[in-house]
Amino acid sequence: MSWQSRAITAICSLVLIYLVGYLLKRRKLEPEYALLWLMTGVVLIILALWENLLFLVTDLIGAKLAASTMFFFALIFLGAIALHYSVKISQLEKRVRRLTQELSIMKDEAKNEQTKPQ
């Protein structure tokens, strides 16, 4: 990888880390999600600055180019994010269903209390 590509990768990683910190500070991002993004930024900086490590990983996975290795791990990362969000969405759907059922039961009980003769 050329020094320009490595510099751009390192700068983008630093921007990512700063942005995650900013979003955490403003409470726009939960710490649970921030950890994954921070780890990604740190790994990208390490790979951008330590070129031999990138070439070692490239050889280990059998890729021809370092850029292919970066794209490979980017796809894995995006797949992990998609899976994580699918799990979270499923959990939220279950909570909404349960809350809807509880609300329906409470409304029914309130309606029965109002129509009961005293």
Image (spheres, rainbow, N blue to C red):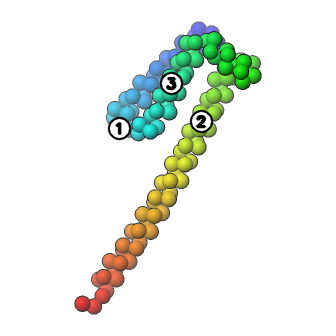
Q: Are marks 3 and 2 in contact (CB under 8 Å)?
A: no
Numbered mark located on residue 27 in the image? 1
Disc 3 residue type (three-letter): Gly
Write the residue at 50% across / 24% down.
41
Disc 2 residue type (three-letter): Leu
Between the residue at mark 3 and the residue at mark 2, the CA separation in whole angstroms equals 14 Å
Write the residue at 38% across / 38% down.
28
Between the residue at mark 1 and the residue at mark 2, the CA separation in whole angstroms equals 23 Å
In the displayed structure image, the side of residue 102 where residue 46 appears, left or right: right
- Count residues near mark 1 (Cα–Cα under 10 Å), then give few for <14, some for 14-19, many for 20+: few
Which residue matches tag 3?
41
The image shows residue 43 at horizontal and vertical percentages of 54, 22
Disc 1 residue type (three-letter): Arg
Choose top left, top right, bottom left or bottom right for residue 3.
Answer: top right
Q: Going from the N terminus, do you reach mark 3 or mark 2 first?
A: 3
Q: Quadrant of the N terminus?
A: top right
Which residue matches tag 2?
78
| Secondary structure found at label 3 | helix
- Count residues near mark 3 (Cα–Cα under 10 Å), then give few for <14, some for 14-19, many for 20+: many
Q: Going from the N terminus, do you reach mark 1 or mark 2 first?
A: 1
Residue 97 seen from this side: yes
